[in-house]
Image (cartoon, rainbow, N blue to C red):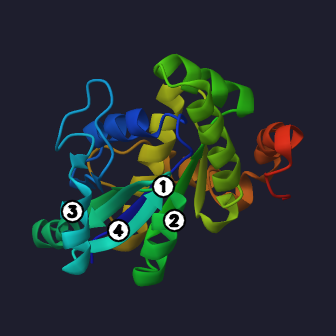
Amino acid sequence: MIGIYIISAPSGSGKSTLVNEVRKLVPGLAFSVSYTTRAPRGSEQNGQEYYFVSRTEFDEMLRRDEFLEHADVHGNCYGTARRFLREATEKEHDLLLDIDVQGAAQIKQKLPEAISVFILPPNRQVLEWRLRHRSEDPEDVIQRRMDTAAREIENYYKYDYILINDQLEESTENLRSVLLAERFKRTGSLGTAPDPGILSRAEHCRLENVQERLKPILDSFRSSDGAAGSI
């Protein structure tokens, strides 16, 4: 059986960069590129960050039951095609799913064996800075993303692992360790030349082992609007 990894994070947490980095380091890892009805941003290319389709095309795929999960986020549709799971299984590759909390819940219902990882920013202020400096989105869009982030963070306790994305190199190594440690548990193989401390590093990222580190992050969102849940 292949490994299935769900990666979720609030917009602006650096998830895409982190996923791109870890894909270079972990062999035998397939990646699901989501379909979306939103327009491309900046230098995004069709088939790279997303498959950009019309609402009509998306609805037709939905009618044909081609999605493992799908969600409507701020009026735009996003979905993970079933074909990625089928293709990964045929190649005996693990599958990495980059999806939001709505999609993650759907995947866990259908594939309860999937391992879930939630990526957090160091605090609310850092997330807002990233959102303001990565694009030229108007103020209402930035505030909407911040409000959505606060709501999404409430779901942290539903995930198996929590990664705090402060330093890219450290966060990449943590995610790599989680993927390889779970692969080891499933198959007995860590792959080629693993770090000696890979299992302990992954264990350090388990939900039950990050409670103290989570408190100041949740407090930074809670102090703004009270949205983040208690530990």
Q: CA distance from mark 3 to mark 1?
A: 17 Å
The image shows residue 212 at horizontal and vertical percentages of 82, 47
Residue under label 1, please give it: 73
For marks 4 and 2, the one nearer the N-term is 2
Question: Which amino acid, mark 3?
Answer: Thr
**Label 1 neighbour load within 10 Å: few <14, some 14-19, many 20+:** few
Q: Residue 31 vs residue 226: left or right? A: left
Badge 3 element: helix
> Can the viewer see residue 126?
yes
Residue under label 2, please give it: 102
Question: Which amino acid, mark 1?
Answer: Val
**Residues at circles 4 and 3 in contact by the CB criterion of under 8 Å:** no
For marks 3 and 1, the one nearer the N-term is 3
Q: Nearer the viewer, mark 1 or mark 4?
A: 1
Residue under label 3, please give it: 56
Badge 2 element: helix
Q: CA distance from mark 1 to mark 2?
A: 9 Å
Badge 4 element: loop
Residue under label 4, please give it: 188
For marks 1 and 4, the one nearer the N-term is 1
Q: CA distance from mark 4 to mark 2?
A: 32 Å
